[in-house]
Image (tube, grey):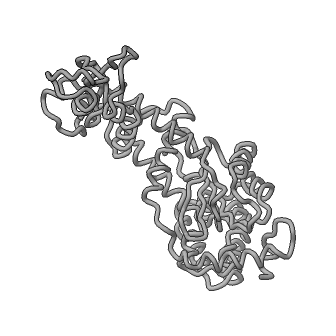
């Protein structure tokens, strides 16, 4: 193809043309991607008037290093390590393979780092002004160790059509008030409409709740039921954990919020004397764990909105892809991997179950929040 471009500009080889504007100038050691590696060769042409060398269109196209970075990102996310990277290259013949460079571990790693830095930058700079969010989830994966000693807080949005959108990610804990406030404020600064009524499903952090209430005009707060179950289990002996978890799940699937609250209150009363810590954990934020029930969300949609499980699923993709990482150098590395995992998860996202009920949920949120101009929670939800 490169030779054809040169011939098109300079004419057939060996035939003199006094009218031609370009002459052949041999071959240069140009570098261009091929089958995941690089080859070195390119035809060259120079202007007859001496103005300089002319570009070869096909070489300009193929020499884009972005192609190599994208290939490295895709193959490493497919669990191919830098050490075994050459095994995944396409067969291109012995002659080409002998001249192909570079496929060393360090070269592949550099391309992967550059590609993940680009993915992180694009995620954090994406314009959110066109999103019509009905619900937003914020939290971490709830399972330490996915990114070494680091924790990433992820914001995920669900629009009116049921599509999921990765919104942002920061490295740190949801208990860090400054960090989570910067996360939520950053969404507003990138154009997210915070004036619409929005269901915010959070992992239970008080700092995160305060940040959402301060930034969003009309939020309705829901607490992740899975986090609440885990928090209660952490304060119980092994023999009681599964029993209490089963009773809490049964309560969260009750027919009404009043029935669920009665069951949870009775369970807390039983635990008061023997395990007061678990009882206090169960009572703390109980009303917000029942927000989805109070809103009357149909079971198919409630399955998604009752927890931040969608975030955990997103980060689990990153956990699977990062299995080859032996040492997490710093928080920036964790952020890059998490962003790459979110990009990959975005390709697998499907509309949430029960997405046809989201417009009805929007109407309910409007009724819940229209009575008061400030953030409204339990009382307004009960009234609706």
Q: Is residue 15 left or right of residue 311?
A: left
Residue toward you, 174 or 235? 174
Q: Quadrant of residue 371?
A: bottom right
Q: Residue at x 61, y 41 (%)?
A: 171
78 relative to 24, above or below: below
Point out residue 335 in the picture as x, y percentages from the top left corner. 55, 40
Res 40 seen here: no
Q: Residue at x 56, y 71 (%)?
A: 161
Q: Residue at x 31, y 25 (%)?
A: 31
Res 303 seen here: yes
Residue toward you, 40 or 83? 40
Residue toward you, 192 or 281? 192
Q: In which quadrant will I find the C terminus?
A: bottom right
Q: Residue at x 32, y 17 (%)?
A: 48
Point out residue 133 in the picture as x, y percentages from the top left corner. 64, 64
368 relative to 41, above or below: below
Residue placed furthest toward the front? 18
Q: In which quadrant will I find the N terminus?
A: top left
Point out residue 47 in the picture as x, y percentages from the top left corner. 34, 20
Point out residue 41 in the picture as x, y percentages from the top left corner. 25, 23
């Amino acid at each position: 193809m490169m030779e054809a471009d040169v011939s098109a500009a300079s004419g057939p080889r060996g035939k003199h043309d006094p009218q031609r504007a370009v002459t052949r100038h041999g071959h240069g050691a140009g570098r261009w991607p091929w089958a995941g590696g690089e080859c070195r060769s390119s035809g060259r042409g120079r202007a007859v008037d001496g103005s300089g060398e002319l570009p070869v269109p096909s070489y300009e196209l193929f020499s884009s290093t972005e192609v190599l970075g994208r290939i490295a990102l895709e193959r490493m996310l497919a669990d191919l390590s830098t050490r075994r990277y050459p095994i995944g290259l396409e067969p291109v013949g012995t002659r080409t393979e002998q001249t192909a460079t570079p496929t060393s571990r360090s070269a592949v790693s550099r391309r992967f780092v550059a590609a993940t830095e680009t993915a992180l930058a694009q995620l954090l700079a994406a314009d959110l002004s066109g999103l019509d969010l009905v619900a937003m989830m914020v939290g971490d994966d709830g399972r330490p160790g996915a990114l070494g000693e680091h924790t990433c807080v992820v914001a995920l949005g669900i629009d009116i059509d049921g599509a999921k959108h990765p919104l942002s990610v920061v490295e740190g804990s949801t208990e860090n008030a400054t960090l989570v406030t910067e996360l939520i404020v950053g969404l507003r600064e990138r154009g997210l409409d915070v004036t619409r009524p929005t269901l915010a499903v959070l992992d239970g952090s008080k700092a995160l709740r305060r940040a959402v209430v301060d930034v969003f005009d009309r939020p309705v707060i829901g607490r992740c039921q899975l986090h609440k179950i885990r928090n209660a289990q952490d304060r119980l002996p092994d023999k009681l954990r599964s029993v209490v978890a089963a009773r809490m799940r049964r309560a969260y699937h009750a027919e009404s919020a009043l029935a669920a609250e009665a069951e949870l209150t009775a369970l807390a009363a039983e635990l008061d004397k023997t395990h007061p810590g678990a009882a206090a954990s169960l009572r703390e934020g109980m009303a917000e764990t029942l927000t989805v029930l109070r809103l009357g969300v149909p079971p198919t949609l409630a399955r998604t909105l009752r927890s931040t499980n969608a975030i955990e699923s997103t980060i689990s993709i990153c956990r699977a892809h990062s299995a080859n990482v032996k040492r997490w150098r710093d928080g920036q590395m964790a952020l890059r991997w998490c962003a790459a995992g979110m990009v990959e998860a975005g390709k697998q996202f499907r509309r949430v179950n029960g997405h046809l009920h989201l417009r009805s949920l929007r109407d309910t949120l409007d009724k819940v929040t229209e009575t008061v101009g400030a953030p409204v929670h339990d009382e307004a939800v009960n009234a609706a």
